[in-house]
Image (cartoon, rainbow, N blue to C red):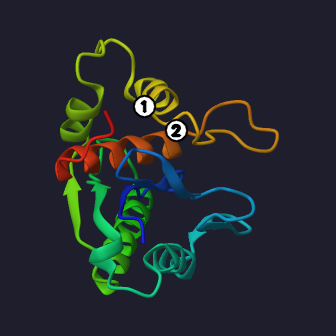
Amino acid sequence: MIPLVVGIDPGKTGAAVALDLHGRPIEWIAADHPDEGYIVKGAKARHYVPTSMALWLAELIGDGPASSRIVLAVVEKQSARPGEGRSSILTLGYGYGLWIGVLAALKIPYRIVPPATWTRSVFGSMPRGSDKKARGVLTAQAQIPDLPLTWGRKTKPHTGLSDAACLALHALDLTGRGAA
């Protein structure tokens, strides 16, 4: 079994990316991917599908103990922003809690990191003038070129997927097994 790290951006347009310890992408899942996502669009809203989240991680683990396959999962800490409605804050917390619960239930070691921590680690000396999403896309494209940030008719890179990839790169840093 190849040891892995996992980065998770738990938002409604988030994603999760598994990298081997050399920084190569092994698997990924995007919340809003039309075939394999963990969000389902209903009549008026989107709904998380916890089973999809759990199955994706369980398949990564395989038959052995979780910690022997997934060395570390890093989850972006979520927080409310001024001006967000109560409903969106509840949804944000719900998805975040689902990922944490699934990781705990599967006994996968994880860390919760604030955005400022992982961006400082992954972006390094990249100019702060550009926004976080653009820096995430550029970093993911440069360091993990085999990870598809678009699919189907999409032409704009999926920022949740690029953030999850950057979170996985931060997990590599935390384990001391960085790709470079």
Q: Is residue 125 above or below residue 159?
A: above
Cβ atoms at labels 1 and 2 below 8 Å apart: yes
User: Foreground residue, 175 or 8?
Assistant: 175
| Among the two numbered marks 1 and 2 on one chain, the one whose residue lies closer to the N terminus | 1
Q: Looking at the picture, how far across and down is residue 87, in whole percent? A: 44, 62
State the residue position of label 1: 136
Q: Is residue 93 above or below residue 169?
A: below
Going by the picture, which residue comes out furthest to the right? Answer: 153
Q: Looking at the picture, how far across and down is residue 4, in whole percent? A: 37, 61
User: Foreground residue, 141 or 114?
Assistant: 141
Viewport quadrant of the N terminus = bottom left
Q: Amino acid at mark 2?
A: Thr
In the picture, the disc for residue 99 is none
Tell me which corner region of the image, top left, top right, bottom left or bottom right, holds residue 106: bottom left
Label 1, label 2: how far apart the Cα atoms are:
7 Å
State the residue position of label 2: 159
Residue depicted at x 29% and y 41%: 82
